[in-house]
Amino acid sequence: MTKAQKADRAADRKAKRSGYERGSRSYIMSQIRGKDTSIETLTRSYLFRRGLRFRKNDRRYPGHPDIVLPKYRTMVFINGCFWHMHGCASSSVPKSNVEFWTAKLTRNRERDAKQHAELEAQGWRVIVVWECELKTVAAREERLRRLYDEIVAPLPSRADAPIPSRADAPENPPENAPEDAPAARNHPNYSDSGAA
């Protein structure tokens, strides 16, 4: 038996232990879709049947939300539990190449949190639907009904936000303010950057 044959046999044994034939894991991973997955189409068809109209996979926004509902200022992300590190039973880290997968999935989770924070700062309501919430028929019906209710619920308007009173102002003016500074300088949202 030559060295090449021994190497091939060792590679075949390793592939059998991992559950994939040599070279097939890469092919399988390449076939995973990034958009228009079965759970996305299922969710979109439910919302469409309920009368909601939306844009899908809008590239103008951080994270390219799966569903954008401008009328309701709402964005829906339909996440796979594995790729977005949900924490449920479906989101376990692979046993091989653990360091690579842990780093990659952690980056995905951190990126999601950053993008959601950006959208919320722009005034959007962000809703995440997880793959595991849509697995069984009963769970799917309950989650989609709840999703519809979350979407059509009124957003808290900015007018409802409490207006700061003089009692909220700091007791001492900023160090760089003259003593006869107007009362506006004592307001917590005051910025001295535009002062002449």
Image (tube, rainbow, N blue to C red):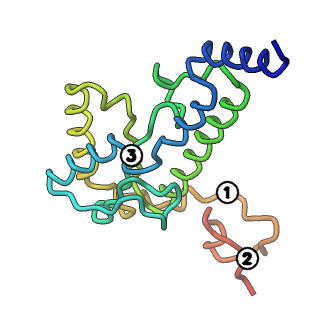
| Quarter of the view holding residue 135 | top left
Residue type pointed to by label 2: Ser
Q: Earlier in the sequence, mark 1 or mark 3?
A: 3
Quick check: 27 above or below 168? above
Find disc 3 in the rendering and name its residue: 127
Q: Tell me where residue 119 appears, x and y as whole percent.
A: 49, 57
Q: x, y (%) of residue 73?
A: 35, 61
Which one is closest to the eye, mark 2 or mark 3?
3
Could you say which quadrant of the image residue 24 lies in?
top right
Q: Callout 1 environment at 10 Å: few (<14), some (14 to 19), or many (20+)?
A: few
- Height in image: 150 above or below 195? above
Which x, y percent locates residue 70? Answer: 33, 65
Q: Earlier in the sequence, mark 2 or mark 3?
A: 3
Estimate the spatial distance between the alpha carbons at disc 1 and disc 2, rounded to whole Å.
Answer: 21 Å
| Left or right placement of residue 20 versus residue 1 in this view | left
Which residue occupies 60% across, 47% down?
111
Horizontally, is 89 left or right of 137 in the view?
Answer: right
